[in-house]
Image (spheres, rainbow, N blue to C red):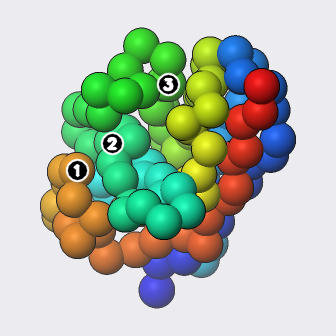
Amino acid sequence: QVRLVESGGGLLQAGGSLRLSCGPSGRTLTRYNMAWFRQAPGKEREFVASSSWGGGIGYADSVAGRFTISRDNAFNTSTLYLQMNNVKLEDTAVYYCAADRLRIGALPVLYDHWGQGTQVTVFL
């Protein structure tokens, strides 16, 4: 069973920076494709960024140039990060980490494993 645990969310001012982390609990994720999604109140879950186990990276247009996804494959496990810079009010959302052994893309349905989410709130 793959369990994902996000951390690093919080309250920050527009223009600031924050780093989110996502680690596995109970299983390694070194050959999993992973991604970040977010969901704002009243809106559908949307793609933020993805990282394939082979090294491919993708970003949503809304965060490209401001957010950076990376992963640490040390110690035969894999921790996923999302560095958020120059945050905007519209970045306020619950951020979710997702993983899948075979699939990758911008649709939530492609991922079998999800974390519980971490809240990011941006204020002026």
In the rendered view, would you say 28 is above or below 69? below
12 sits left or right of 115 in the view? right
**Which residue is denoted by mark 2 in the rendering?**
50
Q: Dot 1 lies on which element?
A: loop
120 sits left or right of 77 in the view? right
What's the residue type where badge 2 is placed? Ser
Q: In this rendered view, identify the residue nearer to me: 116 or 56.
A: 116
Whole-angstrom CA distance, mark 3 to mark 1, is 16 Å
**Which residue is denoted by mark 1 in the rendering?**
106
Q: Residues within 10 Å of mark 3 (few under 14, many from 20)?
A: many
The residue most toward the bottom is: 1
Q: Quadrant of residue 24?
A: bottom right
Marks 2 and 1: in contact by CB < 8 Å? Answer: yes
Q: Dot 3 lies on which element?
A: strand
Residue drawn 70% across the image and 15% down it: 15
What's the residue type where badge 3 is placed? Phe
Residue drawn 20% across the image and 67% down it: 110
Marks 3 and 2: in contact by CB < 8 Å? Answer: no
Task: Locate residue 89, reporting x and y percent.
Answer: 62, 32
What's the residue type where badge 1 is placed? Ala
Residue drawn 72% across the image and 30% down it: 18
Q: Quadrant of residue 81?
A: top right
Marks 1 and 3: in contact by CB < 8 Å? Answer: no
In the rendered view, would you say 101 is above or below 123? below
